[in-house]
Structures are given as C-alpha cells and as structure tokens.
Image (cartoon, helix red, strand yellow):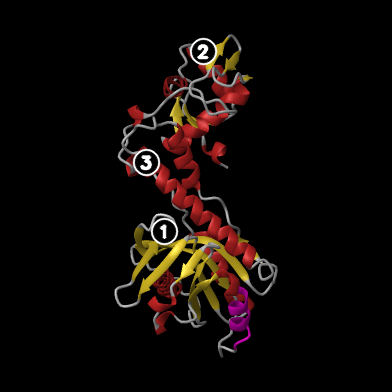
C-alpha cells in the first residue's frame, strides 16, 4: 500500500514560476530552464517507476514511501522510493536518462552520451548514490531506536525507453543492481520470495513508517538565493491565467490581457499571481508588497482584494502580514 504518495516536486512549480517572470535574455534564464527540464525528467521517471510497480503497490504487506528526506549525520538524504516490509526493505533510485550510459566502477563516474549530438555529460553514479542512502537509513534507524536488523536492498533503475546500458562498462559490483525498468518487477518478486531469517512484527514496521512520516522534511528552496537573482530582476504585474502574459491591465472592475484578450475579475486572476509570489519570493506578504508586485496604486482597493482572498493574517489592520501557504496546496 502507498503510505506516502508520489507528488509533483514543488521545485518544478518554483522554476516554472521563476522562468515566467524573468526575461529570456536574463543571464540565469538558460540555467533555470535547463534545471527545470532535469527536474521534470526526474519526476517523469518516478511516475514510470510507480507504473512499473503498480501491482505491488496494492499489496498490504508492502509499504511504499516516495521521496522521503531525512536528516542523518548532520545532512539530509532523499530516496526516490522506499518499499518497506516485515522481511526486507528495498530502496530504489530512478534515472530517466536518454542515450548511451557508461559506468566506471573504480572511479564512480557515470557518463551519458547524447544519441543525437554525441555530447558527454557526467553525473553521480546512481547505484553508489542509492547505496549511500541505504547506509544513511540504517544509521537513522539506530539513532531513532528502531529495528535495523532487516536487510536493505538498494537498486538503481533506468526508466527512459531510449536508455542504452553499455554492458562493457559494467563491473561485478553492479551486477543485478543497476538495470532497466522492464526487469524490475521480476527482481522485486524474486527478492520478496527470499527468506531473510529476520522478521519484524507489525508493530515494529508500523513504528518505522510512522517515524518516517513524522521526521520527513521535504526540501523547500529559496530560488532567488539559489540562482543569485535579486528580486528587482523579476517581471512584476498580474499574470494572465490563460496565456501567462505579464502584466494584465486593470479596466474598472475587470483585468484584461493585451495578448489573448482574456478578461477576469480579481477572484480569477489574483490567486495565480499571488501563488507566483509565494513560490519565488516568500509565503508571506504585506499590503505594500502586494501592491508593488501587482502594480496596484489604490490602497483601499488592495485591502479589499486581500480580504476577498480569505488569507490567513497576522498582526493588526495596518501592519498585517498575509500568509499565502494555502495557495501552494
């Protein structure tokens, strides 16, 4: 059963919002778009992984936990998918790479050769990565005073249909632990049929799952700080919900898009713009910040719009700070 479901990473929403509010000629624009493509590809790989294991996800004796991020040894580690059972735990790292993939067992180097351009890119070796997470999790279980006796198997899975795994670059340490997604169900079925000699009680397994959910800390980035972008570089103004043109123009009680002709009221057009602010800048804003970001000059009108959004509010009327976290759900 799925204990922690797979969700679209918030970093994708953040980078989409940031790319919309930067001019294409901005010096960091290309880096942001490239990183966004990588995160989208990774998420697609994780969805493919879940599809491949769809028959196992319904089994009551297996606990699926996606994108768990835990603190151990002073650092956070994150695993794409944990499958926990009474007899063994399985860690899976998905890689949605296209092209020829070469591995060097001695140096830990993992190289992707683009099938179209021949360009070579070097990445972290996925098997070493998931094995490191496995070891971190074992230490985490001990620190949390939970049972750490059940064996943990770690696998790296290639999810892209056009990934070519170069067998000549594989060594014995990778045998059976790094493979294409097509063979994953058979590997999992074989593993589940093995007798480990160790068996957790239902109470022990439930305690591990409960503690993971309690201690899980999803990553939230400050994207402006990450990419070294001052807030003044952002394109501000109300964003058209239909075509994303910025800014829309205010005409009496309506907002109008000069590109596609979309017309909407404040209840329609303001939430997407405020969500952009929450994703890029901060989940909190004042009336003044709201007016500056949305290009509004009428203070009472801005106060009226903010009240209409029914946002959580801190402070008095004059120094009110509005919380935008509900817009991110």
Front-most of residues 283 and 22: 22
| Circle 2 residue | 300
| Circle 3 residue | 30
| Residue at the (51%, 73%) spot, across then down | 179
| Residue at the (30%, 39%) spot, across then down | 228
State whether residue 22 is above or below residue 5: above
Estimate the spatial distance between the alpha carbons at disc 2 and disc 1, rounded to whole Å: 56 Å
Front-most of residues 243 and 12: 243
> Does the rendering let one see residue 252?
yes
Q: Is residue 189 magenta?
A: yes
| Residue at the (42%, 20%) spot, across then down | 292
| Segment colored magenta | 184-194
Q: Is residue 57 magenta?
A: no
State whether residue 15 is above or below residue 303: below
For mark 2, give the secondary structure. Answer: helix
Q: Earlier in the sequence, mark 3 or mark 2?
A: 3
Which quadrant: the C terminus?
top right
| Circle 1 residue | 114
Quarter holding residue 2: bottom right
> Does the rendering let one see residue 283?
no
Estimate the spatial distance between the alpha carbons at disc 3 and disc 2, rounded to whole Å: 40 Å
For mark 3, give the secondary structure. Answer: helix
Query: Where is residue 328 shown, x and y percent of the image?
Result: 54, 40
Number of residue marks? 3
Query: Where is residue 232 shown, x and y percent of the image?
Result: 33, 27
| Residue at the (55%, 63%) spot, across then down | 161
Which quadrant: the N terminus?
bottom right
Estimate the spatial distance between the alpha carbons at disc 1 and disc 3, rounded to whole Å: 19 Å
Q: Earlier in the sequence, mark 1 or mark 3?
A: 3
């Amino acid at each position: 059963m799925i204990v922690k479901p797979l969700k679209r990473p918030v970093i994708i929403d953040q980078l989409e919002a940031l790319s919309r509010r930067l001019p294409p000629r901005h010096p960091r624009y290309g880096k942001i778009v490239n990183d966004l493509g990588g995160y989208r590809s990774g998420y697609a790989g994780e969805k493919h992984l879940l599809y491949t294991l769809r028959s196992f996800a319904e089994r009551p004796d297996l606990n699926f936990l996606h994108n768990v991020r835990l603190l151990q040894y002073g650092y956070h580690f994150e695993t794409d998918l944990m499958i926990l059972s009474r007899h063994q735990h399985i860690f899976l790292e998905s890689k949605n790479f296209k092209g020829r993939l070469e591995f060097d067992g001695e140096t830990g180097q993992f190289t992707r050769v683009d099938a179209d351009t021949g360009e070579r890119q070097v990445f972290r070796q996925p098997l070493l990565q998931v094995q490191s997470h496995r070891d971190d999790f074992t230490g985490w279980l001990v620190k949390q005073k939970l049972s750490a006796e059940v064996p943990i198997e770690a696998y790296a899975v290639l999810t892209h249909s056009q990934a070519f795994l170069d067998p000549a670059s594989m060594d014995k340490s990778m045998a059976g632990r790094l493979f294409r997604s097509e063979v994953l169900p058979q590997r999992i079925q074989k593993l589940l049929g093995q007798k480990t000699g160790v068996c957790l009680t239902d109470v022990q397994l439930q305690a591990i799952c409960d503690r993971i959910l309690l201690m899980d800390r999803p990553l939230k980035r400050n994207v402006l700080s990450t990419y070294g972008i001052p807030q003044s570089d952002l394109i501000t103004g109300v964003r058209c919900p239909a075509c994303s043109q910025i800014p829309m123009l205010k005409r009496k009680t309506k907002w109008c898009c000069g590109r596609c002709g979309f017309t909407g009221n404040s209840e329609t057009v303001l939430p997407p713009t405020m969500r952009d602010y929450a994703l890029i800048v901060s989940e909190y804003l004042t009336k003044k910040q709201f007016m500056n970001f949305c290009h509004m000059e009428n203070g009472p009108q801005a106060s009226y719009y903010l009240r209409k959004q029914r946002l959580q509010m801190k402070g008095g009327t004059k120094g009110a700070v509005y919380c935008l976290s509900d817009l991110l759900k």
